Amino acid sequence: MRRLVTVAATIGLLLPLAAATTHANPAPAPPQAAVQWIDRTTVAWPKNLGDPTHPHRLVHGTGTFALTPQPGGLTSGQRAKYPHLAAYDAFRIAPGDRSHVPDALRGQLAAVTDDITAGVQIPGVLDDLYAAPAAKAELGPAFHHGRPTLSVWAPTARRVALELDGRTVPMRRDATSGVWSVTGPREWTGKPYRYAVTVWAPTVRKTVTNLVTDPCSTALTADSARSVVTDLADPALAPPGWQGLRKPRAVPLRDARIQELHIRDFSVADRTSAHPGQYLAFTDRTSAGMRHLKDLADAGTSYVHLLPAFDFATVPEKRADQATPDCDLAALPADSERQQECVGRTAARDAYNWGYDPLHYTVPEGSYASDPDGPRRTLEFRQMVQGLAGAGLRTVMDVVYNHTAASGQDPRSVLDRVVPGYYQRLLDDGTVATSTCCANTAPEHAMMGKLVVDSVVTWAKAYKVDGFRFDLMGHHPKANILAVREALDALTPAKDGVDGKAIVLYGEGWNFGEVANDARFVQATQRNMAGTGIATFSDRARDAVRGGGPFGADPRVQGFASGLYTDPNGATPGTPGEQRARLLHAQDLIKVGLTGNLAAYRFTDSAGRSVRGSDVDYNGAPAGYAAAPGDALAYVDAHDNETLYDALAFKLPQRTAPADRARMQVLAMATAALSQGPALSQAGTDLLRSKSLDRNSFDSGDWFNAIHWDCADGNGFGRGLPPAADNAAKWPYARPLLADPALRPGCPPMEAASAAYRDLLRIRTTEKAFSHTTAAGVQTDLAFPLSGKDETPGVITMRLGSLLVVLNATPDRRAQQLPTLAGTPYTLHPIQAAGSDPVVKSASYDRTSGTLTVPGRTVAVFRQGG
């Protein structure tokens, strides 16, 4: 191996600090940043990096720090803080050099031995030096007596200046916190601004001056070109009645019934809306969409969960810049490839995206505003919250702090251009982790964690948001999410205008990627969040109800609500005996789900064994993981993967009549709606919403995504083959289905499904037995009396206090005899007896024998009493 024999030679490789931002030659590839500077005294060095007998050094722009081996490697405290570095060697910086550390961090760094040169990761030492004082800083625009102070954390910057109103204003650096700030006159209010940050950028190996918006922006110009100096407390930004807004009664998380909704999907195809595709559509009280939400609220829905509504990167915000497909999409065949091809040509420039590509975390997205420039997006977001409250609904925001739209010197990178190498999570070689599909952030770093907490608190206080759903919450430390909870709990109506304790939190507790199995910190995963009062989505019952899994190659694999064993489609693998066994295991998973996914809940499983929820297997993991009702959130569909209708289209026998498809849809939804703990449903699912079999419609445009509130417009099925990028492998299964007109339901099945679902919501809301607060209460009050080796495949019978619930997923009428109930009077629940579904009204109970008889594809609830 060629060796670098002198320190002078190594320093000669370092580019000058004043390297021009317009350097024409491409920068050399940066050396792997495999060495990690974890605090002001300690450097963690991989054991296999360089000759261990050679001197180890940190070379910086003005000198060198000699490193001394730390016997025994990292200390126990350091290993606990950085478990993924536990096997690294440790080196110490000499006491005499430590006063020079802050200046060294403001330039190029290299880790050097005589035979290697490596880059250096610096988040740990930045936290050690600056996090405690910076945690107290008020970042972004802050107003005191009408005068704005603008502050940005940029500890590694050589210079930060404010560009405002056509001039450049110097900013002052606080050496203790690393925060740069400047205070201006009242006249700055409403002015666009950005920062000029002069900083070493390791991805291009030169010093650059980045012109960048404020990471803590509270307002923006169109397309996020500039931040705007904005006081969110300005009365001009509040709609009439905002200060005294009365929200619907707060519903505890364990009782939350949530509609997940994309802002544009909601109204863009609604001819009765005066503001299609906008925040203001939620103020159109007489539109079809708002009338439907009001009906759901009256039946028991308590929250609307909005897909990302913060500023995101992929949609042109000015309507004049938004492209639309130039094809007559409606004239094309239902199974054609041409719709997706036409939509795909404009997808990068159209008005549609789910928005999981954050640009600024604490500013409303501009494309949903009537004018994306400046204050309208703030005002109209607040009007949306008002409109939902007027319909009886509280507002949840989907927040995506786990990744950014871009990193490095990309123009869509904000955080990484202010403090390069800090806000993004770096892998061992220094590259940015992308396990979340994008450039991962690092909420385990103090100032990224602070950004998360501060942003959530701003949405709660300034926008009266009632809940937050964390995207890929398992990529956050548990401590970060608990810090959010603590900060919200401190908000009071008297001091802050909101009751923070009433704000609900839930998220995706999936366990994967570079952080999996607590590799870097204790994650906010399903298992780890149990007992915190912060819910995680439960995939256990979801897969059992639908069949298969979200990433299966064959979408036809059946489950409990799609005909497994009881109504075979001829494509599901396995013998009848094997299918029967899978169905009974699916029923066990659903039973655990109905308890609220409780780990300690004891029942008899379908094999006749006495088990706990945690003993039931889910793909090698415990099915039950919750400590109390409210720890697990039940759902059978959401924006990810096929809608429930589309999943059933793949799985039910193709001959299944539309009315029966609607009944199976309601039965599937009931497994979540009638569970202990919170439940979520994708908006439009009660109306059999389809996305024409699209499993990942994040960029599929209005054509595939819009909700059709008028049943005469159909449910979205048969709008062409879904986009090839994520669906082409399933086109052979999709073509015959999309071409079948019998799978495009008319108004009667759509209206019947919605009405039957609302009946179930009313039962869930009015019967206290569905709302237990403790695992012990569930254990006492809830049972599956027919569970065991002789239970009926395709039927689940649940006793819940004075209620009996039968979920009959088979095509035929089934009798369920409970001899211990003989002589006890039960009748069909009055809401169903007087409700919308004529089929369930034929369900019966024979008091003499204690036998419940329930029609096929039906959920029936019986109540004790004459």
Image (tube, grey):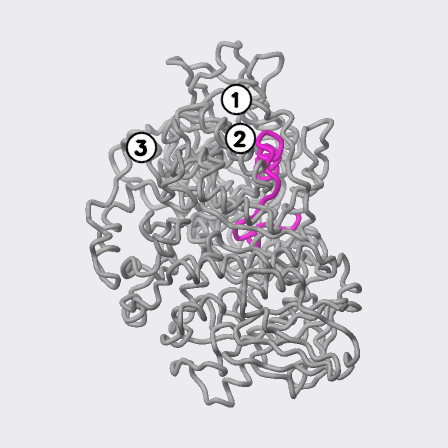
At x 64% / y 36%, what residue is drawn? 247
Q: Which element type, helix, strand or loop, lies under badge 1?
A: helix
Residue 797 lies in quadrant: bottom right
| Numbered badge on residue 319 | 3
Q: Which residue is at the front of the view, 346 or 329?
A: 329
At x 67% / y 80%, what residue is drawn? 605
Name the residue beneath numbered marker 1: 237
At x 56% / y 22%, what residue is drawn? 240
The answer for how far apart the CA atoms under marks 3 and 2 are is 21 Å
Tell which circle, 3 or 1, labels the residue nearer the N-terminal end: 1
The answer for how far apart the CA atoms under marks 3 and 1 are is 22 Å
Where 360 sits versus 183, above or below? below
Q: Which element type, helix, strand or loop, lies under badge 3?
A: helix
Where 451 sits versus 170, above or below? below
Magenta region: which residues?
451-479
Q: Which element type, helix, strand or loop, lies under badge 2?
A: helix
Can you say which quadrant of the picture contains the N terminus? bottom left
| Numbered badge on residue 382 | 2
Instruction: Report the side of 406 relative to 807 (left or right).
Output: left
What is the three-letter code of the residue carrying label 3?
Arg
